[in-house]
Every structure is written in structure tokens, then in C-alpha cells.
Amino acid sequence: MMAIIGWIILGLIIGALAKFVMPGNQNMGWLMTIILGIVGSIVGGFLAGLIGISQDDNPWDIGSIVISVLGALLVLFVYGKLVTKQ
């Protein structure tokens, strides 16, 4: 149960940081921000593994947070392109 709460808290932090860094209005609530952060963390960790950046199992260190925010920025960019009406 504590792991799920940890993922939710980390997802909220990562999602909020990504929304803060990304310019523009993202029109998503706190639940979508949590989902953005969790998916962004997974994407960031996957991409970091592909390029050979090793991570330890501590999600609260600065390297993991930076990689997670970069992954969330990528997910937020793709989400913005898919949802934006042109």
C-alpha cells in the first residue's frame, strides 16, 4: 500500500514539475497530472536504460527526478500534439 502512495506522490511531483517547465496551458487536473508524472517516470527510466544511464533504486535522488521530469516533458509534448485541435 505504501508503494502505491509513493508512486502517487512521486507522480504528482514529477507531473507538476513538467507542467511548470512546459510553456503554455495544459488544461489537465490533478489526476491527469499524477498519471502524467507516473507515465513520464516510466518513459524516462526506459529511455535512460536504452542510452546506458544507470539508475539506482532510489526514486527520490536528483538524477532520477531529472530523468523522470524529462520523460514527463516528452509525454506532455506528445499529449499536447494529440489533444490540440487544429
Image (spheres, rainbow, N blue to C red):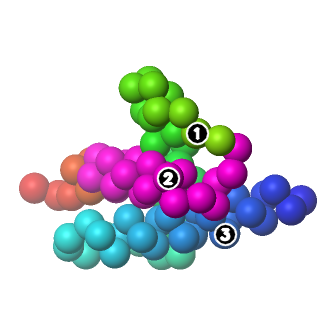
Instruction: Estimate the x, y position of residue 42 in percent, counting from the top left.
Output: 55, 42
Task: Name the image quarter holding the N terminus.
Answer: bottom right
- Viewer-nearest residue: 69 or 28: 69
Residue 37 in sight from this viewpoint: no
Report the residue marked by disc 1.
55
Residue for badge 2: 63
Say which of 78 and 74 sits in front.
74
What is the span of residues highlighted in magenta in the rendered image?
Answer: 57-78
Residue 55: percent from the left, percent from the top? Answer: 58, 39
The rendered magenta stretch, by its main secondary structure, is classed as helix
Helix, strand or loop under label 1: loop
Amino acid type shown at disc 1: Gln
Disc number for residue 44: none
Q: Is residue 74 magenta?
A: yes
Give above or below for 80 relative to 9: above
Task: Report whether 66 appears left or right of 82.
Answer: right
Residue at the farthest left position: 86
Rounded to the nearest whole Å, what is the CA distance between mark 2 and mark 1? 8 Å
- For label 2, the crowd category at 10 Å Cα-Cα, with few meaning under 14, some 14 to 19 and many 20 or more, is some
Query: x and y percent of residue 3 in the render?
Result: 81, 56
Dot placed on the residue nearer the N-terminal end, 1 or 3: 3
Badge number at residue 9: 3
Q: Point out the frontmost of discs 2 and 3.
A: 2
SS type, badge 2: helix
How far apart are the alpha carbons under marks 2 and 3? 17 Å
